[in-house]
Image (cartoon, helix red, strand yellow):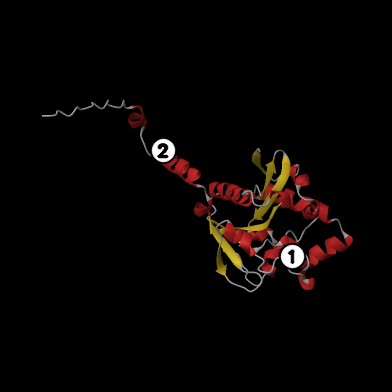
């Protein structure tokens, strides 16, 4: 079984699950999102948001594929690009963090570690860009019927998902706590070792790297 992670682009946008491809819950403020769903084209609004974010800020999503099939995705951006973020009771997002908005794994692939793989991909990307943390709003009542906020039940990931991939609650709330993941803790052990080796090698002079290693002479014990 092969697994790969790719950036969200205008081409890979079409591989999102159909309901998510047409959803603008995060991309627009509540009033504009409701208007787009009622009388506009939410799919076109979604594409416009991704295009603008890619041009102005850079990569804003990751997709996971298993044997060539889309199996999950996450989307993220600075809170200034996410109008919905200010509508939560536990806002605002911290100034040093990017906001992870949507995280979803296709039911057939749940339990295979794709959620952690996606979050680690985001962490590596944001670390290179100088961002220190990821924050997210979790749904503490995911799966329960909520007629007052029907879209939130599918667009806000469960708190349990975020906790399972290393997030910690920084602002509690009975429905929408805000959680945070320090990016260094999101990286795998292997990535940490590679990073340490790069730092070590980068601090060594060329003379040190090219210096021959003196052979070690074996000693033999003498028995009396």
Q: Earlier in the sequence, mark 1 or mark 2?
A: 1
- Taking the image as shown, residue 35 lies to the left or right of residue 207, namely right
Residue at 71 percent of width and 47 percent of height: 71
Residue identified by numbered label 1: 153
What is the C-alpha distance between the residues marked 1 and 2?
47 Å
Q: Nearer the viewer, mark 1 or mark 2?
A: 1
Residue at 57 percent of width and 70 percent of height: 171
At mark 2, the secondary structure is: helix
Residue 212, quarter of the rendered image = top left
Point out the residue furthest to the front here: 224
- Report x, y in % for residue 130: 53, 51
* Total number of numbered discs in the rendering: 2
Q: Which mark is residue 44?
A: none
Most foreground residue, 167 or 100: 167
Q: Which mark is residue 202?
A: 2
Q: Are marks 1 and 2 in contact (CB under 8 Å)?
A: no
Binning the other alpha carbons within 10 Å of mark 2 as few (below 14), some (14 to 19) or many (20 upward) gives few
Point out the residue furthest to the right here: 39
- Report x, y in % for residue 139: 67, 66
- Report x, y in % for residue 66: 69, 41
């Amino acid at each position: 079984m092969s697994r790969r992670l790719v950036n969200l682009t205008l081409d890979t946008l079409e591989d999102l699950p159909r309901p998510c491809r047409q959803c603008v819950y995060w991309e627009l403020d509540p009033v504009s999102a409701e208007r787009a769903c009622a009388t506009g084209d939410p799919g076109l609004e979604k594409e416009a948001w991704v295009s603008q974010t890619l041009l102005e800020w850079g990569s804003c999503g990751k997709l996971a594929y298993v044997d060539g099939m889309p199996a999950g995705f996450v989307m993220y951006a600075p809170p200034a690009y996410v109008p919905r973020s200010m509508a939560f009771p536990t806002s605002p997002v911290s100034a040093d963090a990017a906001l992870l908005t949507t995280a979803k794994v296709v039911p057939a692939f749940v339990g295979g570690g794709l959620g952690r793989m996606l979050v680690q991909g985001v962490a590596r990307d944001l670390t290179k860009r100088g961002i220190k943390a990821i924050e997210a709003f979790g749904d503490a009542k995911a799966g329960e019927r909520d007629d007052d906020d029907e879209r939130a039940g599918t667009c806000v990931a469960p708190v349990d998902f975020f906790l399972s991939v290393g997030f910690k609650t920084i602002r509690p709330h009975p429905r929408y706590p805000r959680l945070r993941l320090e990016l260094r803790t999101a990286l795998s052990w292997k990535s940490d070792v590679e990073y340490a080796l790069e730092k070590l090698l980068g601090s060594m002079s060329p003379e040190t790297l090219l210096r021959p290693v003196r052979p070690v002479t074996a000693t033999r014990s003498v028995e009396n």
